[in-house]
Image (cartoon, helix red, strand yellow):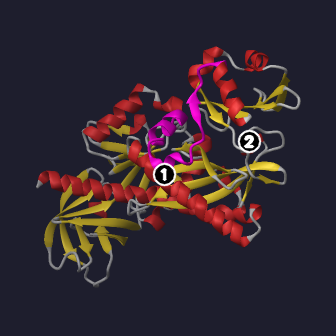
Amino acid sequence: MRKAYKLEWFEHDEEVIYCPRSIVKEREKKLISFGSYQESVVCLPHPNKQNVFAISISLSKRLHIPKFISKINVFVRENTIFFGPLIGIFTNGFTNFRLYPIGQRSSMFSKLLSVQSSVGVVPFLFGENHIDWENGMVKGHFLHDHKWETYHIPLPNVVYDRLPNRRSEKGIQYNEIKQRLQNQYGIPWYNPGFFNKLEVFEKIENDPEAATFLPETHPLQSFSQIETMLSKYNTVFIKPINGSLGLGILQIYYLPTEENYYCRLQDKKGKNRLYRFTSLEKLCAKLISPKVFHKMIVQQGIKLIQFDKRKIDFRVHTNKDGAGEWQVSAIAAKVAGQGSVTTHIHNGGLVKSLAEVFPDDVVRQQSEARLMKTALCLSKAIENNMNGYIGEIGFDFGIDSEGEIWLFEANSKPGRSIFSHPDLKEFDLLTRQLSLSFGIYLADQSITATEELVT
């Protein structure tokens, strides 16, 4: 049984806990679990017959439950009551400043942790230097009353991976910590690793339904390969396999009426550039070094629908919920900046709601339904073919002039720039709630699996 309860605090000489009478009918001892810590505790039926838990302050200190927690999920299994789940959000970049413990990302994390009461979980931030392996404890950074506070708490029930970039994941300590928590303590670790563009496509291309949304994509191997793709599609994209924010992307297209080749890109200074060449050989010699072939892919160009004569694509967020089911949590349109090869905001792009780009209600509803169906299909395909627990995905889709939907990219740690749009504020909240709700599901599954091993 799992349910969210109000948690109250009181002074008492004895280390006791009052429980709803549906759980405890008379004085008895039960195991109380918080994170990786368990303790045999005297449990009493609530004297006022209230459907809440009330814990003595002396007991809360022994269990290391932060006193400000006012609502919490409770899992009841046989003779054990599990409080939590305690969700450790693993990241790096910690500072010594109390107001901004994770530097510029402190604001983003404060928004994430602010949903703890509405979800009924106990989330905290920690990094590789905050674990006390000898005592099985963590120095966790909590958000309370809009302020950051640190508490020493047990190892968490689950870990939510929020490292900011690929470089962070290459550290030896990261892999050692992840493996130790997973293997030695049986702690689920979700959303590990950034997706590799080519790997995602190769993993799901054998799924008949998912494959219909994939543009032709190959690892870049030669200039003649680019020429072959251009002859088929007139335009191609060269993309970094592990790129992000649209950096390093080139759009190449051929105009047969001019017999010229064009390349659109963003230069090192962030300026949008358009170059013209009389041959593909000259273009490649100038802009694409063979030394970077192994880091790039070549992808079929798509003739996208437009808004105000600018191409648009669509960001669709999906999240796993507290029941472990995929759901679409946000959809937005992204309009390319003037002369930009991508729709990213930092490159002049604009975020628009579906209502703004599809003023016709019928067209909007049909487009939204098809984008949602595609996102759910691909979420399941990626989950079935990739390693680890995946709890959220940000998809970049294009819709072509024929109305077909194409997958450009899937992001395991999607950015949140679309939520700057005023019409998407409620979806900003929903995605944060769901990202922590999935931790409840994993904790429940972990508890069940542990019980099955014991029995």
Among all residues in the image, which is located at the extreme bottom? 48
Q: Is residue 319 above or below residue 79?
A: above
Q: Quadrant of the N terminus?
A: bottom left
Q: Quadrant of the C terminus?
A: bottom left
Residue 453 part of the magenta-drawn span: no
Residue 390, visible in the rendered structure: no
Q: Is residue 210 above or below residue 201?
A: below
Image quarter of residue 287 = top right
Local SS, label 1: helix
Residue 105 % position (x, y): 59, 44
Residue 6 % position (x, y): 38, 72
Residue 213 part of the magenta-drawn span: yes
Magenta-highlighted residues: 195-223
Determine whether, in the image, residue 296 is placed left or right of residue 325: right
Name the residue that disc number 2 marks. Answer: 346
Residue, x 41% and y 68% (percent of image)? 70
Residue, x 26% and y 45% (percent of image)? 186
In the image, what residue type sits under mark 1?
A: Glu
Residue, x 56% and y 48% (percent of image)? 213
Name the residue that disc number 1 marks. Answer: 209
- Closer-to-camera residue (151/346): 346
- Closer-to-camera residue (130/378): 378
In the image, what residue type sits under mark 2?
A: His
